[in-house]
Image (tube, rainbow, N blue to C red):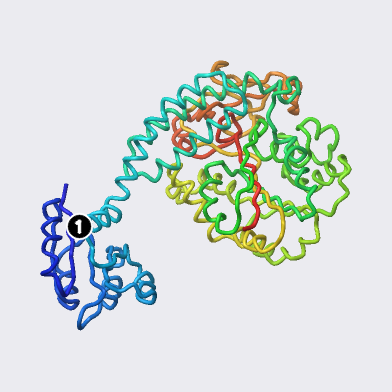
Amino acid sequence: MEKVNILWVDDEIDLLKPHIIFLKEKGYEVNTSNNGHEALEIVKTKDFDIVFLDEQMPGMSGIEVLMKIKSDYPSLPVVMITKSEEETIMEDAIGSNIADYLIKPVNPNQILLSLKKNLENKKIISEKTNFQYQQEFRNIGMEISNRLNFEEWIEVYKKITYWELKLGQSIEDGMTSVLKMQKDEANQVFSRFVEKNYLDWVNSKTKDHPVQSHNLIKEKIFPLLDDDKPLFVILIDNLRFDQWKVLQPILDEYFRVEREDIYYSILPTVTQYARNSLFSGLLPTEIERKYPKYWVNEDEEGTKNNFEGELLGELLKRYGRDIKYSYYKVLNQTYGKKLVELMPNLMVNKLNFIVYNFVDMLSHARTEMEIIRELADDEKAYRSLTLSWFQHSPLLEIFRFLAEKDVNLVITTDHGSIRVGTPVKVLGDRNTNTNLRYKIGRALKYEKNEVFEIRNPADAFLPRVNVSSSFIFCRNDDFFAYPNNYNYYVNYYKNTFQHGGISMEEMLIPFVVLKRK
């Protein structure tokens, strides 16, 4: 391991010899200077890892030296050491981005602590995080092997997401691959759990069933309408739970999280089915039967989600909720900015639903555009890109506006997505849909043990395009590939973010209630 190079600048440097000897015995390389001008010349001759800088020196002051160092070497950490505790001096130093602030007289252990904090902080945190996950690994593994119910699966997914984010901050990636293996195992077991219980859930054959897309508004949103404040529900399309967790620190500046829930998307985990069900409070065949003009089948032309506002209105009517409400769908930046201007007008409504489509567009762009494929090369990069978009989006302006108002606020979504990696062969006719995570068709050929099949779509309240139609769904990180041109197809879609099938990332999705601070 290379020695850490320290530059210590103090006009009384001779009095600090015991400290310097102490640091050299600890393995540090220490260069010294007794004035600011000389220190600036020394900095040019050698790569230093950190500078200890006396604030009160004759001639060029510590603050002046600090500003010059930061101008030329902005990433070089500088620790300010001073006899004075004057607030203005502290503010000047802090405003110039010091790494630490020590008051004289300093002892060797204070110096050592500052070095560890500034130079070894990431390494120490990384080692600690890896050790903690190693301890938790066995506990999560035992939970996965138990017969979990739907609530326990939510808790397991929250734990896995916590460690995924925590290990993502680590400078060592050894445990990240271990976590990925554990997450894959969890998804395999979760898929079997869903297959075993899904039809009972949607047919209400058991009291022990989760909140799903079609009863989300009734179970989670209606209770919030009993308050006398306006309710804003912001549905960010295709927002996974881990993506919510990276947005949360930004929103923590303005809101406190009153409740953080996870609910289950219906199958297929795509906008056409899950979001129409959410707004209508009905399952797909119920929408098709009750509101045929608002449902567009897979084989029909036209946008599949053009009537969400109308379906919401019908839902409110059915439950006798005679309230003023609005529905807006943001598909691009220009309309997002326009909606920011409209926000004051929405305060008179009892309920305001805003659908924001960026994340879904990002996942599709991740497949189609080479530059996005490179920017979002893995899970961590995908989260980072989502965060970067959010920080510069009109949506953040909308949140800032709401933080100034006395309103109830919900963030939710309709489904998530998963990074696919394992191809599964399927053969279908030209009328088969193009989604990579589920297929509907009348002549599908596949290995039964590789998919979750629903031979009679009516059992799952799914529309039947023709008499012999059936649905099949991918599990875990599988994706469907046609035998024709197989290698090209696999190479093009592998490691892209897809949705429509069964995985924790697609089905276990956030419902968060926020209150302004």
Q: Is residue 511 above or below residue 323?
A: above
Residue located beneath label 1 in the image: 108
Near-viewer residue (316 or 128):
128
Within 10 Å of disc 1 (Cα), the crowding (few <14, some 14-19, many 20+) is some
Give me the residue at 62% from left, 37% from top: 262
- Residue 335 falls in image quadrant: bottom right
Left or right of 124, for residue 510? right
Give me the residue at 57% from left, 60% from top: 393
Q: Residue furthest front?
A: 105
Give me the residue at 50% from left, 19% from top: 145
Near-viewer residue (342 or 107):
107
Point out residue 47 in the picture as x, y percentages from the top left corner. Answer: 18, 62
Point out residue 283 in the picture as x, y percentages from the top left corner. Answer: 76, 32
Left or right of 67, for residue 22? left
- Amino acid of disc 1: Pro
Point out residue 249 in the picture as x, y percentages from the top left corner. Answer: 52, 53
